Amino acid sequence: MINKITTADARKKFSNIINRVAFGEESFVLTRRGEPIAALVSLKELKLLQEIEDQIDIEDAWKAKKEPGDPIPWDELKKELEL
């Protein structure tokens, strides 16, 4: 369950909120002036999100590899992306 809390209230209850996230595996959306600005999630949830993102990146890479055309050399791609 995701709880919403203002940044001002979060400051006042910081240690309690951290314990609820770390040990109770609750999540919080921090709001400022009614707008969501950040989230606090457990490390377990963060790792899951990262694994999902990695899996999506892998799937996208395989799709790109199957696209027709000649491969672009890494040096050219870096230059094009200004890396």
Image (spheres, helix red, strand yellow):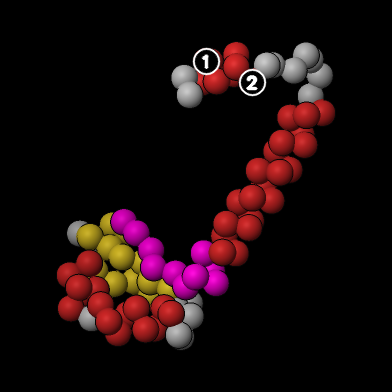
Q: Which residue is mark 1?
A: 79
Q: 54 and 35: which one is in front?
A: 54
Q: Which residue is mark 2?
A: 74
Q: Residue at x 74, y 18 (%)?
A: 71
Q: Helix, strand, or loop for circle 1?
A: helix
Question: Label 2 near label 1: C-beta < 8 Å?
Answer: no
Q: Which picture quadrant has residue 68?
A: top right
Q: Residue at x 55, y 72 (%)?
A: 44
**Which residues fall within the magenta stretch?**
37-46
Residue 81: x percent and y percent? 51, 21
Using the image, tell me which numbered label, if any, was put on residue 34.
none
Residue 3: x percent and y percent? 38, 75
Q: Residue at x 49, y 70 (%)?
A: 43
Q: Magenta includes 40?
A: yes
25 vs 47: above or below: below
Mark 1 to mark 2 CA distance (whole Å):
9 Å
